Amino acid sequence: MTVYLKNATFIDWQTLEFKNVTIKVNSGINGNIEFIDNFSAKPDDNIINCEGKYVTKSFACGHHHIYSALARGMDAPKKNPRNFYEILKYVWWALDKCLDKDMIEASALSTAIACAKNGVTFVIDHHASPYNIEGSLETIAKAFDKVGVSHLLCYEISDRDGYDIAEKGLNETENYLIKYQGLVGLHASFTISDDTLERAVALSEKYNSGIHIHVAEDKYDQEYCKRNYNQRVVERLNDAGVIKFSKSILGHCLHLDDKEKELVKNSGAWIVQNSESNLNNNVGYFDSRGLGNNIMLGTDGMHSDMLRSAKSAFFVGQGFDSIDYTGIYKRFRNAHEYLSSNNFSGDGENNLVVLDYDTPTEINQDNFFGHFLFGLEAKHVQHVISNGELIVKDRKIISVNEKEILEFSREQGKKLWEKMKNI
């Protein structure tokens, strides 16, 4: 089945040029699109009238946490966290210990649906389930594939639950990388021993991958590193070889000094900004000055709406960062650059969104950024095409039964919350 987008206003995501065209969307991983004048459709082809609609490349998330999907609405932790470390200890590390295979699957399915309906067709995820590690990444991959959302996964290797669990994380990562594209995940410097760090870097080298790690999200990370290794976080990661990979992703990077910023800037590694998560955890504000241009946006598991992430990063950045209209759009689209420059599959030209954008004012190439920041929202996503296949039609997911999946997720959420009472 071929998808045709008839009478569309196509917005080139790189040049922002507007074209009135009919688009033939070819299916397949890394497929392309064609602008055509006439076509002869087959009976099973999908022809969508896009008159008055805007078509552009779909979106990508640079840092997600599907494992947090079932947290929404859960009880407060038994002990009120007083700082970032205690937020991890009493909330997220309590939750991830309770995840089983069904909970992981429910989390992945519901997250993939949310992403798709928000126009996100590629997700870079950072997973943790220390007591259910084996096979967890493949469970997530199959769930995302079922919905039709492409992915770049990793398991969050950490020594915080003991060396045996760190070993399982390394094994899970290798077993996954044998069959799938992915990254080597690490939690953060303060939960990683030198031995585990060394082995993770070696794994990246073996499979031509990169490291996906949280970096100086909170001052605690720096304080721990200086106290235990007599170095700052990026210095330690640099010496270990973490940031030498062009595929490496450094999450947050809030509390870096000028020397660390210079190391990151010259490394070729990528930074992912997660402003709303930083606000929620009260850990500080992202400042790009001195870090270079390899900066993309993520959600850190807060939600699955990349348009929302872009707006948050822009508005928060007015007081703490050097950011303008062009800059925030570049960060919004930089996940595509990261994926393309590192030859990852699943983010080809045939990943598109159709926007039913009811603007009261003219939109064109010259004023697009004003609409991007102050007009466009996820509610305007009407249709979504992933790898040439229509997965969202008229704002409804059509690749899977959303009602059944949400019922399954709610059931697993209740089980998770009950299980957490005993942690």
Image (spheres, rainbow, N blue to C red):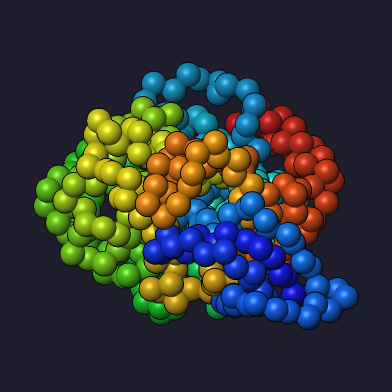
Residue 384: x %, y % from top left: 66, 57
User: Looking at the image, is 246 positioned above or below residue 289?
Assistant: below
At a point 45% along the width and 36% down the height, the residue shown is: 374
Where residue 255 sits: x, y (%)? 23, 40
Horizontal arrangement in the rendering, residue 115 relative to residue 321 (left or right):
right
Residue 39 lies in quadrant: bottom right
Give the quarter of the image for residue 20.
bottom right
List x then y, in percent, for residue 240. Answer: 25, 64
Judge whether residue 282 can be spotted in this image. Answer: yes
- Give the quadrant of residue 140: bottom right
Q: Quadrant of the N terminus?
A: bottom right
Q: Quick one: 216 or 309, which is closer to the camera?
A: 309
- Residue 346: give x, y in percent of width and height: 57, 70
Residue plotted at (23% across, 50% down): 233
Q: Quadrant of the C terminus?
A: top right
Q: Farthest residue toward the right?
A: 43
Is 70 located above or below residue 166 in the figure?
above
Q: Nearer the viewer, residue 354 or 209?
A: 354
Q: Residue at x 33, y 33 (%)?
A: 316
Q: Residue at the spot x=52%, y=64% of the render? A: 19
Left-right relation of 84 to 72: left
Residue 159 visible, this angle: no
256 sits left or right of 381 in the view: left
